[in-house]
Amino acid sequence: MISKVKNAMSTLVGGMMPHGHHHHHNHHSGGGQTCGPDSLPPRFPYGRPDFLDLTPELLQYSTEHASRPVLALKRGSRLPWRTGYAEVINAGKSMLNEDQASCEKLFVRKPSGKHRNSTLLEDNGDGTGIPLHFWGVFDGHAGSGAAIMASKLLHRLIRDRLGEICHLLENPTSAPPICLAKNGSPYQAETKKGAAQEPEDPDAINDSSVRFHMEKAVSLESLVMGVIETAFKQMVRKLSYAISGGCCALAAIHLMGKLYVANAGDSRAIIIRNNEVIPMTNEFTPESERQRLQYLGFLRPELLGNEFTHIEFPRRIQHSELGKKMLYRDHTMTGWAYKTIIEDDLKFPLIYGEGKKARVMATIGVTRGLGDHDLKVYNSNIYIKPFLSCVPEVKVYNMDENKHGPDDVLVMGTDGLWDVTTDREVADAVSAYLSCCDPSDPMRYTLAAQDLLMRSRGVLKERGWRLPNDKLGSGDDITVFVVPLAGHESET
Amino acid sequence: MISKVKNAMSTLVGGMMPHGHHHHHNHHSGGGQTCGPDSLPPRFPYGRPDFLDLTPELLQYSTEHASRPVLALKRGSRLPWRTGYAEVINAGKSMLNEDQASCEKLFVRKPSGKHRNSTLLEDNGDGTGIPLHFWGVFDGHAGSGAAIMASKLLHRLIRDRLGEICHLLENPTSAPPICLAKNGSPYQAETKKGAAQEPEDPDAINDSSVRFHMEKAVSLESLVMGVIETAFKQMVRKLSYAISGGCCALAAIHLMGKLYVANAGDSRAIIIRNNEVIPMTNEFTPESERQRLQYLGFLRPELLGNEFTHIEFPRRIQHSELGKKMLYRDHTMTGWAYKTIIEDDLKFPLIYGEGKKARVMATIGVTRGLGDHDLKVYNSNIYIKPFLSCVPEVKVYNMDENKHGPDDVLVMGTDGLWDVTTDREVADAVSAYLSCCDPSDPMRYTLAAQDLLMRSRGVLKERGWRLPNDKLGSGDDITVFVVPLAGHESET
């Protein structure tokens, strides 16, 4: 991620913000504090990629442009589901990749006594349990620490939380019980009046002595969604006392015939099926979440620290404009109206700027993600965290209800990709590329991912990295997964 | 509207809510306080409909079922744009229609001195100004007072607010100025240093001595949206000291080639074009706005009055279940997870129930609308108004960018229609009906509206009003507009 967090706000103190946001690639955060570039072969000039825990020997890089190589899987290395992967580091301005990724096959099992705290264990040796596939892309800001930690931990948290409802997953046809017994152990329902109960009968868990007129049916699917949401919250707590900085998180989880896509931030995932685009995420930015943030500022003005106003204006207001009328909108409005400017309106707007330049409290350009506990407005004691959410939006795609050909894929990418290439262009590029590839070639999805990256990165010309239309390529880190939806059918 | 507001909550005091919500048509609110059934011809057994200010002589009613007639325009009466209209009162259980409607042609003009407070004047006699067409349906609860007042006032408020930006509407090609002069009069920009300025030049309004790096472009369209949002807020203030009860409000405004559809409540509008459905509204209910309401309850727990919890559970919790684990979701979650039940969870959930039975604080089934200032939880001092919003969602449909045939229409209806008939069924019924009608018949849209009503009302059988599939018809008031999108081309 580049310049999503500003760490220079020199003139806020004077009540005015700097207007110099118009250079896209000006600001850089410190660089990763946990992954050093030591002892790397010379062909990785930008630091060893930590993603996927792959060693440099398992990676290839495009030699075409030595100064900004595209890294991808080497022929012979292989990810679950023949997943294609590629990444590129930003245009030579930082040494380290703030994007991180993970791709794992895990197994969901009931928590056993000896593995109670199994999060940090790779406890899938014997291949028993319900298989779970996980893909994650993590776009870090203010360092890559949060992204690295999330890429190593989030999938295990999800697996462990799923383990707790494992007995429900094993019984997918019966609805989950509304209430579980006191000790939390689902098979140990409190027996009443000595009535004989099958301990393995999930219905017995309900207190059957009470009948309710209204009882909402809760699906197993929405329980898995709750697990994913809970795991994101838990991930944030684990980061809070370990890591500064933060990251956007986009995760895809395949479990029992369904694909759950969870997004917290501005990364994006689309499914391409028969060359049609099915969006699987919404982005969470100061613009898309304006009303939620303004509402919080309105209800809890103390969080604005007397420096910010929750009202949005189309530009900064001059002191000399007091008493005039200016366009505004508050947390209730989508349209704009005029209001008479009062003293309070001279404060800096909570949400300010447009598109990629939009910021919360003049500082951060995304409103959901993991980490950022210490993030403050520059030169102030105003915390930004209360305005940020760690909870992903989860969308579900039913894999089993659809037939997939070898060219039907899930594409996951950080914003560096989508800033430059539209959904439609990505779909056309992937479809065109794959249709020319041998369907049995295990490298085809990695090659398609690499092709996508090169399109967004562009080619080094005299005046920087340029796209074929001579527009500026993405200067950001880019990470892309291309996951074949028919891939699991070829898995054992 | 029926049973959207409960006024009997006999057992809340004891900490438990009544479970008797399962009868759909049990609860009725008081009846309209401002429109009496006096001096009516015998063929209007349920009180004179106030809608549209039409006299009984301009209306016809279907004699087919004397106990529940469908009222519609008589042949010869005519609304702007050949608009079709029909309504039916609920199934004989109340005497008055809580639904109200309005359909008006107005003209937007600059506010002149003598008409400063023109809201209550029908100041469109001479036909000058920018033409504005308005359709509104207002579904009242706890009486029809708010619905009647909104049907008589909302369109005038919108016209007056538009009048204030009339000079901008007359200049649609130039972007609205961000800032207006101190006295609010847009053509009286403050002159600087004696520089000659064209008083009718809108650019002169901007303080041209300042250049801004970031200035958001605001479209005229979003200014009109802001006008509509502001007018709804103003309508609520006018209701607050005049009327008890409330209403859902759905309004369509045609202005300068664009159709603005504004919705606050659970009415619905769809456009049918080439027999395709284009949804123009979202409904605002305890279920669709759950997270917004829970967030408010979470941030401002004092609004819950120690009686309610912002957390949602799939059913009421028994005291004996303390310490057990139950499914829940909070304001951040879409999925469900288990939590250990504590004392606080025994409070009644802020949002409770499913579908048409979902309620805020066990009282109201819609979360946006006009009025309801005095609405309290039964037998308590807990106000519900802070959880309700009066701000509509506004969607814009560009009429001029699309070509419309005589069978392309906007259908607006209260929830009584859509509870029984789906969007698709409505579209099919309207398309089938209109295709059999002479396109030049001015009655065709009213006949189509009447046909829609009869489909949702059903036919009186031994066991109540029944649909052809023998399911129960809508017992609610129903109001329907069928507005031909090519209609304005035939207008002078």
Image: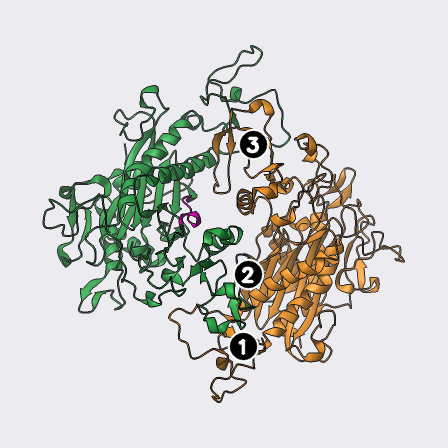
Chain colours: A green, B orange
Q: Secondary structure at mark 1?
A: loop
Q: What segment is highlighted magenta in the picture? A: A384-392
Q: Secondary structure at mark 3?
A: helix
Q: Relative to the observer, which residue lies in front, A242 or B177?
A: A242
Earlier sequence position, callout 2 versus callout 3: 3
- Residue on which the image places disc 1: B181
Q: Chain of mark 1?
A: B
Residue A402 lies in what quarter of the image? top left
Mark 2 touches mark 3? (CB < 8 Å): no
What amino acid is found at the position of numbered circle 2 in the picture? Lys
Q: Is the magenta region chiefly helix, strand or loop?
A: loop
Closer mark to the observer between disc 2 and disc 3 = 3
In the image, what residue occupies the spot 60% across and 26% down? B318
Residue B214: image location, x then y, percent:
39, 68
Q: Earlier in the sequence, mark 1 or mark 3?
A: 1
Residue A373, percent from left and from top = 36, 45
Viewport quadrant of the C terminus of chain A: top left
Left or right of residue A207, residue A120 in this image: left
- Mark-to-mark CA distance, 2 and 3: 40 Å
Residue type beneath disc 1? Ala
Q: Assess disc 1: are there few (<14), some (14-19) or many (≥20) residues with their C-alpha within 10 Å of its C-alpha.
A: many
Q: Nearer the viewer, residue B99 or B141?
A: B141
Say which mark, if any, is on residue B344: 3
The secondary element bearing badge 2 is classed as strand
Residue at the image position 16 percent from the left and 41 percent from the top: A55
For label 2, the crowd category at 10 Å Cα-Cα, with few meaning under 14, some 14 to 19 and many 20 or more, is some
Q: Which residue is mark 2?
A: B395
Sequence-wise, the earlier of marks 2 and 1 is 1
Q: For the residue marked with disc 3, what is the amino acid?
A: Asp
Residue A180: say if magenta.
no
